[in-house]
Image (spheres, rainbow, N blue to C red):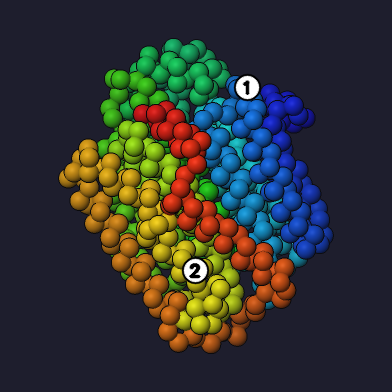
Amino acid sequence: MTLDLLLGIGPDNGLFWVLSLPLVGVALLALLPSWRLASWLNIAVAGATFAVSLSLFDHRPEATRFLFIDDFNIYLVTLTTFVGFTTAIFSAGYIARESRAARLSAVHLRFYHAMYQAFLFTMLLALTANNTGVMWVAVEAATLTTVLMVSLYRSREAIEAAWKYFILCSVGIGLALFGTTLVYLAAQPVMGDGADAMAWTLLIGRAHQFQPDLLNLAFVFLLVGYGTKVGLAPLHAWLPDAHAEGPTPISAVLSGLLLNVALYALLRFKMLLAANGNTLAPGPLMILMGLSSLFVSGFMLYRRGDIKRLFAYSSIEHMGLITFAFGMGGPLANFAGLLHMTMHSLTKSGIFFAVGTITQNLGSKRLADIRGLTASHPVLGWAFAIAVLAIAGMPPMGVFMSEFLVVSSTFAREPLLAVPLVLGLLIAFGALVGRLQGLVFGEPVPPARSAAGTASSRGGALMTHGPLWLHLALVVVAGLWLPAPLVRWFETVAKLLG
């Protein structure tokens, strides 16, 4: 009823349930006294949300002034609900072990599960918002919920990381608000006052009439603002700390989902500039920030001593590559960017599933304390090795395919730009592969006394390892074969992005 009144959709609309289920989950999970029951309910709500999101393919709801589904966001909604579901499964086993290690109290566990669903709701609202203001509010709300989750352990480091995350991303989102206001001012003389001048479905059709100078200025603020949330260098300082100090399942959805949502918001505004032939091309700015992210993160990978920070910088690298691809533009580069968004989400969340289990087993996040995983934990060690090789861009994984498309499209159009692109990828590849050898081979290091122990049951092991292997299977299949409907889908969206 609340969504019906506020956003103009009712229970007969599939989008109503995609947004309502996480909200209902927040209320129920906040009240449940049993964290074990809360873990199962969290899985059930996330699974139901994923199932309902699939129904949007059969019946796409009619757009309202506040919500809509189109070819672009429907794929991201499905990806978000799927990774949210698999992460909820992994989270149940992870949280059970955290409880046994007495790192989280019952109150913290209840808060964690409620905030998890709140986080999913804010991301889904940002993706489906047909209003630039609602989208901005949803992205800001996603920041606030994740700040609370990053600080969950209440340690000095966790609170410091959450505070840095809050300050930097709030400044960024404030700049994005100013950019959003400038877009409204550019649209107002053409669209009139009110919601019409903020609705994506209406803006895109008349963007060619908007004042180009205002759009140019707006995109600079939007790139800096939403680029901070994406984690693009040099705006990335919050990201390694937030990933390192929060619960590992939150690192998985931060890296695999939230960065995509922020980039999605930026790409929506890029579509407006592409529809107006008198604006400056946004591509060069995006290419510059993409390359800077690639090189900064690539060199920083060699200096990390914390396994979660290592893969946080890997996320910065890949978001830089995706931003570079969309900056290049054109059907092939946009196709590659969309594919890489998907492959990075699946692979990086899978890596954090493995990292969470590794750090719990060994009681340490320090790379020096993690050795010989294939000997001490063979199933986990080999899964982790495959996942790291996948994110490094080794064939035949899906990440290799998307990176190959980005490089080949750059060589075809701007050969000089392909040189620093390939160099940045090789720098990151060398760092990851070099780290991997010590992590998975050699003499195992005895676990620290604070280790949470291994999974206590076959069911616990399935919840811990199942999502990881599922993600890896999808990434391997995507590197060898993409279904024809999925290819057509990406091609359609690539044309929309300009």
* Foreground pick, 210 / 64: 64
Give the class, few, some or many, for how many residues have Cα within 10 Å of label 1's Cα (few <14, many ≥20).
Answer: few
Circle 1 residue: 62
Residue 387 lies, in percent from the top left, at 47, 63
Instruction: Give the numbered dot on residue 487.
Output: none
Q: Nearer the viewer, residue 159 or 92?
A: 92
Query: Element at badge 2?
Result: helix
Q: Which residue is mark 2?
A: 384
Relative to 237, is 409 on the left or the right? left
Residue type, mark 1 in image: Glu
Q: Amino acid at mark 2?
A: Phe
Counting the numbered discs, the total is: 2
Q: Earlier in the sequence, mark 1 or mark 2?
A: 1
Whether 166 is drawn above or below 213: the answer is below
- Kindly give the residue lying farthest to the left in the view shown: 416
The residue sitting at 30% across, 20% down in the picture is 277
Report whether residue 237 is seen: no
- Give yes or no for contact between labels 1 and 2 (Cβ–Cβ under 8 Å): no
SS at mark 1 in the image: loop
Q: Position of residue 404 (x, y in %)?
A: 32, 49
Q: Split into 4 quadrants, where in the image is the C terminus?
A: top left
Q: Residue at x 67, y 64 (%)?
A: 463
Badge 2: residue crowd in 10 Å (few <14, some 14–19, many ≥20): many
Residue 211 x/y as whole percent: 35, 18
Residue occupying image coordinates x 54% and y 17%: 196
Quadrant into which the N terminus falls: top right
Q: Compared to 137, does 25 lie above or below? A: below
Q: Residue at x 37, y 16 (%)?
A: 208
Q: Measured from the top left, where is residue 386 in percent x and y? A: 46, 66
